[in-house]
Image: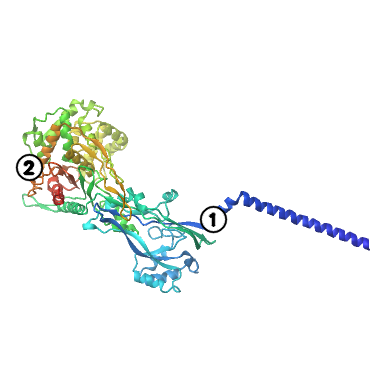
Amino acid sequence: MRTGQSGHAHRTRTRLWAFVGVVVLLMTTLVGRLAMVQLTQQGAYARDSSLVNTRLVHEPAVRGRILTADGSPLVDNAAKTVVTVEPAALLSHRDGGRALIDKVAAVLGMPSARLWDKTHLCGSPGAPPPPACAPGSPYQPIAIATGVDTRRALSLLEQPENFPGIGVEAAPVRHYPHPDGVNAAQLVGYLGRTTPEEVSKGLGDQDLVGRAGLEQEYDSVLRGERGTTTVAIDRRGVVTRRLSHTDPVPGNDLVTHLDARLQAATEKALAGAVAQARQATTDARGKKQPGDAADTGAAVVLDTRTGAVLAAASYPTYRPEVWTGGISSRELAHLTSEKAGVPLTDRVTSALYPPASTFKVVSLPAAIKSGVKRTGKYDCSSSVQVGGRRFHNFESHAYGMITLRQALVVSCDTVFYRFAYDNWLRLGGLDARSDVHDPFVATARRFGLGRPTGIDLPGEAAGRIPDRAWKRQQWESTKDQVCKRAKRGYPEVEDRRRAAYLKELAVENCAGGFEFRGGDAVNFAIGQGDVAVTPLQMAVVYAAIANGGTLWTPQVAAGVRTPTGEQVKTFRRDVTGYVDLDPQTWALLRSGLAGVVRDGTASEAFRGFPLDAYPVAGKTGTGEVYGKDATAWFASYGPLPKPRYAVVVVVGQGGEGGKVAAPAARQIWETLRSRGP
């Protein structure tokens, strides 16, 4: 019996020790695994834990202001009352918070559906398309109503038991004080939310960035440094607490060269020119004639000594407030509509027009370089035959034999036609393959045409100097399409005469569109044909004539200040080139341009202006565009003899330059005269 009990006890002890051994082995394995995790994988697990349990939330900084030269704000910041809701408050309701939103909407007097749409973050499942959805982060309160009545909003906070999770904030938004009535919408630009690509490059998903104008060009100056908050979240993604916070740093202010009073006067003069061009007129027989279409326009004022942009206006324009608080689809469609004239476009820098006779300040020195004598007299006939086509004067009549100065004063096209055609023949006519020895092309490029001016605004157009190389490149890129049109014509064009003309043109260009013909040369000389410039480019050209040949880079911004007013940066003014003409040619140009205003094509517009006390020089232009009304130009500088300003006005489909653009420029000169020398 004892022997049996002894064996049983031995077996029990054996099993016990075996069990202990297994436990020890398991514990050793577990401890070893924990040690390995702690020692070798601690960082990875910590990162994974952080990703799961915390989130970094960005807080945009208050954006810097855009100021005029005297410090008046063109773009400021104002506070708008914003009603928010915590995502957790929505999740805590069985209906997703719909009843809560209905109650909030009733208090605010707003459509419930609009607020409900805003509870859906853009890009989330079931969210409506922008701008109905809400931009932002799921770890921050969601803005469901912006710009609401403050008293109504604050009443929500007085009843927290009825409106759980509802908050009220004062959010900064862009504000436009309109000093002296200034609009400047295209100049200042607008803001938009960051794209996914921008977020991937480090911007916050709630940041507003510049999308046009100065807001875009100087976005990094104005935006400031965003703040950050690290929050803890639970498994539902709901924020449970704030772990750390860094305050945002406000953006700096941008100071411009713009003069508010002059800017307002420039905008008013341009709008007035458009309205005048559209007015019906009565001809000599008493018959009423419809006005011109006058669908676009631009005006710009430069400081001839520095290139500073003192004023710039574009037509059509819009109120910049349309972007504040989110733009509607209907408003955006209007701003980008061809029928409305695409108001978003800044026509000072981005629209191309044929410069017409304002280009003669380029062609005159080019003709002299080609061998034309400054002191000679030349035939101002009513027309000139070039090849199989007759080219007529537009702004002037036949004047007989006249001087080069007189050719500028009366704007005689036929004199310049002959200069250009003779030069074309001398270079070899159709056999010429290079532009190297063409003084007309070379002089245009010396004046900076055919390339951007370098202004500190985005989206500037380069313009076009249609030389021989451009003609061939254009033909090679379009010949397949042109040759198809040469065969089938333009059946979709209702006007039969226009359709026939277009087909004839296609036939001609299909066979020899690469050729730089005599007609191309004579059109080039008077700024017609394929020549295209921006109003800003012509302002730079006339500023160079005024200052002796220096091509300044136009500059809108003058410097940067902190929010407290400390100047931290002054922008350098750059020169892009020089126009080297002999003194006699400069004198001839300036004398002719002064005569245009006193006795020539702009004299009627400046009748009664005190030219003896405040002399102004300039040139009219009337650009013909097939199938459209003419483009009206006036480019000028003054006061003489030491010019300080260059003023250019253009009205697309505005009619004659002397009747539409020159009177508008005179209004701007009236403001400049009162500004002082």
Disc 2 crowd rating (10 Å Cα; few below 14, some 14-19, many 20+) is: some
User: For residue 151, what is the image quadrant?
Assistant: bottom left
User: For residue 175, what is the image quadrant?
Assistant: bottom left
Marks 1/2 in contact by CB < 8 Å: the verdict is no
Single out the residue that lies furthest toward the front.
566
Could one spot residue 531 in this view of the protein?
A: no
Which residue is pictured at 39% across the width and 70% down the height?
Answer: 105
Percent of width and height locating residue 620 = 14, 43
Relative side of 149 to 394, left or right = right
> Which amino acid is tagged 2?
Asp
What count of labels does the image hold? 2
Q: Nearer the viewer, residue 495 or 431?
A: 431
Q: Mark 1 or mark 2, which is nearer to you?
A: 1
Q: Which residue is mark 1?
A: 50
Relative side of 90 to 433, left or right = right
Q: What is the distance, in whole Å, between disc 1 and disc 2 at their CAs?
A: 80 Å
Task: Judge whether 164 appears above or below 475 on screen.
Answer: below
Could one spot residue 636 in this view of the protein?
A: yes
> Considering only order in the chain, which callout, 2 or 1, is on the residue closer to the N terminus?
1
Percent of width and height locating residue 8 = 88, 60
> Which amino acid is tagged 1?
Ser
Percent of width and height locating residue 152 = 36, 71
Q: Nearer the viewer, residue 471 or 609?
A: 609
Relative side of 662 to 29, left or right = left
Q: Secondary structure at mark 1?
A: helix
Q: Which of the labelled discs sits on residue 377, or is there none?
A: none
Q: How is the image coloured?
A: rainbow
Q: Nearer the viewer, residue 279 or 34?
A: 34
Q: Which residue is mark 2?
A: 599
User: For residue 386, what is the image quadrant?
Assistant: top left
